[in-house]
Amino acid sequence: MTHGQDSGDGALSRREAQERKDRLKAEFGSRLRVLLDLTGLSSREFALRYPAYKDSAIRFTYLPGKSLPPWDFLHDLLTEVSRRADDPAATQRRTELFTAYRQVLVDTGADVRGSDQNSLLLRLLDGEEVLRRLGAELAEVRARENQLRLDLEEEIRRAQASPGVGGQDRRHQLEEETRALAQRRDALVRRRGGLITELDDCRARLAVIEAAEGSGDLVPVGSGGGAGLHQTSVLPPPPELPTVSEPSKSGGRRPLVLIGAAVAAVLLAGGGAVAGIWATGTEDANNRAASPKPTTPSASATPGTTASSTPSRTASSAGATPGTPAPEQRSWSLIEDLVPMDTYPEGTKRSFTAGALTVNNRVYPKTLYAFEAERTWQLSREYSTFTASAGVSDSTPSGDVITFTVEVDGVIFKEFTMAPGDTVKKVTIDVSEAFRVKLTALESFSTHEGYGAWIDPIVTK
């Protein structure tokens, strides 16, 4: 009797604990609903703006509190709130949401050493905070290195003008501090790179869990646009082709053979007409697709562009009637059309080099490459989309890693690492409300032999 009573009490306790967890998640979902209302967007509109998240996942999973979203979703939600309204409490709101989100994860049983969904979310959340602090510390070290480099150059000039023992001591001190900072920077970069890899692994494991629980309807965490600081794409499995059962009787094959022969005869007879119709339809589709692009043909193409786009524009122009206005330019290259707004003194920061670079056995004629560089472009909220590809030069030493960052108005929207031989990565970001965009490439081990390349970066209206 006592044993049965203990079992009943244990079941009741577990049920109450589960009900409490469900209530906490539902309350947090209500909080997310308030934030979504502040954006002025429906869940569908939000999903269209941030393709990393499905409308169905937002409506049926995150907002009702059936499961907690990743921090990337909250980051994008807060970003949209700040864009839609002048929110003086944005910083406080972010801190409160961060604290509440972590507390809900802990209260629902999450553990950074665990492997369940909430534990992975907690590990991802804490890891992103550590990553942010490492980034801030790394920025301070680099700023100090730049200042030391300037001080050292000034000291060398003074020593040449008036040699003395005091100048040599000062120069030696600056050199020692520079070496110590370089070692500290390399250690921070290695630690940061390892953490990014660990966070990518968390996202991949979360993707598997969400795909299994959502019956394929939920988009895996980190599968596309949005903040997605170190996102890894997980492609859905290809659809299975329908199977055709073979007829059991031998006589059943004859109608199929006769029908196939008839179809073949029709195709042979009408092949010219079908080919003509196909060609006409293709040309018309290409002309329509090319009309909003710039009238000046690009010297290079990003991965995925077809060679037929230029001929189709030419054919369209040739067939245009006199007096037809030229198509309005819709895309602008950060290499050829827009000029960076920042400049750096010689010796303080390497700027990007514009030119051709071989990446993963392919020569890309239009790239911005460097072993360490950052440049900022003024967009003035006049463009809608930023698109580029990223890759590492084939001349980069094995084991070296390049960190790429896209920063919009001081907020990191994309950050990822790549090694030589990695597949070129496509990046697309919504910049409809962006005032400035900054691109960064940073070599991890400072060998000055590896190059990170932004390939054909463009902005589109």
Image (cartoon, helix red, strand yellow):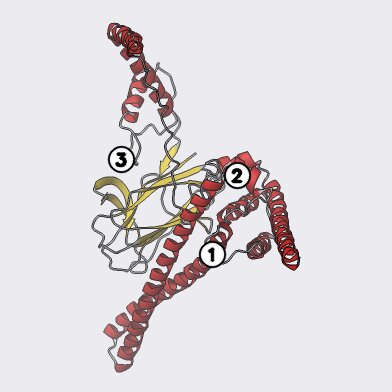
Under mark 3, the amino acid is Ser
Please, is residue 360 above or below residue 160 in the view? above
Q: Is residue 194 above or below residue 390?
A: below
Q: Residues within 10 Å of mark 2 (few under 14, many from 20)?
A: many
Residue named by callout 2? 57
| Amino acid found under the numbered disc labelled 1 | Gly
Please indicate whether residue 397 sits to the left or right of residue 263 in the image: left
Give the mark toward the camera: 2 or 3. Answer: 2
| SS class, disc 2 | helix
- Above/below status of 332 relative to 11: above
Q: Which one is closest to the eye, mark 1 or mark 2?
A: 1
User: Residue at label 1?
Assistant: 114
* Camera-nearest residue between 78 and 374: 78
Q: Position of residue 359 (x, y in %)?
A: 27, 50
> According to the image, label 3 marks what residue?
300
Tell me the residue at 32%/87% (across/down). 172
Which residue appears farthest toward the front when viewing the image?
1
Q: Position of residue 334 (x, y in %)?
A: 40, 47
